[in-house]
Image (cartoon, rainbow, N blue to C red):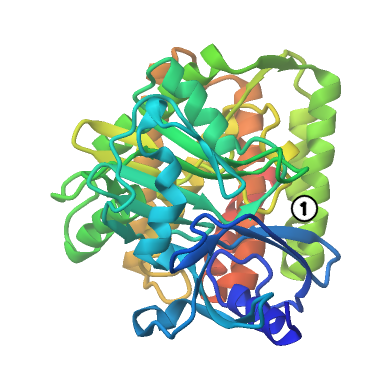
Amino acid sequence: MTERFEASLVDYLSRQRWYAGKGATSTLEQVERFPWLSAGEEPRVRVELVTVSGDDGRRLVYQVPLAYYETEQPELEHALVGLFEAEDDRQLLAYDALHDRLAIGALVRGFVGGEDRPEPRSGGLCHRTTGAVELQSDSPSVLLTAEQSNTSLILGDDLLLKVFRKVEPGHNPDIEVHAALSQVGSDAVAPLRGWIETDPEVTRHGYDLAMLQDYLRSGTDGWEYARASVRDLLAEGDLHADEVGGDFAAESERLGATVAHLHRDLTEVLPTAHWGEHELVQLVTRLRQRLAEAVGQLPALSDQAAALGTAYDEVAAIRNPVVVQRVHGDLHLGQTLRTVDGWRIIDFEGEPAKPLAERTALDSPLRDVAGMLRSFDYAAQSVVVPEVADHQQAHRMSEWTERNRAAFTTGYVSAAGHSAESAAIAALLNAYEIDKAVYEAVYEKHNRPSWLPIPMAAIARLAAVGRS
């Protein structure tokens, strides 16, 4: 591989939405090239794992399937990675394979035939299925543009292929959780149909590369659905949130019930445990550490740090055991879909910035509840951000937020079958909501500064509670 192609590859990565090293200097450390998936035919396709290091010393591995052509492909110009010099000195043009219909066919060929396919291994990959898959290698594919951390493709009419971009050794939690929930027939998720993993005979590290599941064609993005309700409210200047045609509270209550059912299903197929005083003190230590790191990146948080820490200390004072289990870990409205027969939850990878061990660790389901409560605030405030909202808009967005937070909580508590009134639950929920808001503030500073006032306003409110 020439230095010119290395530079082109790093440049291509740095321009992708799923690349975590934006704004930092990136150094290419290694490229692990798998055997050809389509040797002898054009395009020549293979999976490549690219290891990149950043200013912070972290080494991240990205999956970049590439399609190689001898001639320029004008329709793929947007996906051009660079000019590659092959071992036989030929000059090949390398394109991101997930933008190329022919290359995608080579990547999914191992699924064709389901359980009856003769050989699940090819190109250094193993294609696993949960049963027969209705798919052809030449099935039409559509690249979805909304994905941020990964790349998703609609295959044919009924399947969705989610290709993981940042990969780590071990079982991907999105596959693990979907496989477990599919065992109990959970209706909170789309059924898993299969996945792609690396062949252990080819690479010493085992990576999960992609997952195949039913495509929820009727699904409406929960984030946009909620924001449409907020816009309806703001358009009706003399009506309250419960009076407009786009009132979202009934949907919020149904969504709360779905999340409770999801948590119940997870306890049936994945481990559970209890946290005692020692584990709760460890939790508070982690929360305080993340807060300190956030203050280092966002000094404006320092004025609130003491009050937020006081709220964390209330968790350390809990004396009754706290039930913990596998949770979603990064739950918000953007991880939900409203289908014709109810809500579905998607994307169980957890917060992308956290290491795999932390994303798969047992936690209180209240972390997911806190993420959803924060998301209602975000949905409302993002329509007209706090700095530019007038007094009436701010009041109406706050009214929408509180109405839907309450409706979601009602739905969750009713379906979960327990009370939300205990001091322990209140302390945990408050701490998780603070932790989420702090995470949001750091994220917005680096990625979307115009939205930074949204989490900062929430932090000020939560800190005021801590001072009272």
Quadrant that contains the N terminus: bottom right
Image height of 180 relative to 315, above or below: above
Residue 137, horizontal then vertical, whole percent: 34, 49
- Residue 439: x and y, percent? 65, 55
Percent position of residue 140, x then y:
26, 56
The amino acid on which the numbered mark 1 sits, given as a three-letter code, is: Leu
Question: Can I make out residue 410 in this image?
Answer: no
Mark 1 — residue?
A: 291
Visible residue check, residue 79: yes
239 left or right of 117?
left
Secondary element at image label 1:
helix
Q: Is residue 133 above or below residue 110?
A: above
Q: Nearer the viewer, residue 422 or 285?
A: 285
Residue 327, by quadrant, is top right
Residue 271 percent across, percent down from the top left: 64, 16
Crowding around mark 1 (Cα neighbors within 10 Å: few <14, some 14 to 19, many 20+) is: many
The vertical placement of 416 against 60, above or below, is: above
Q: Nearer the viewer, residue 330 or 103?
A: 103
Q: Residue at x 30, y 41 (%)?
A: 135
Q: Is residue 137 left or right of residue 362?
A: left
Judge from the rendering whether residue 94 lies leftward or rightward of residue 300; answer left or right: left
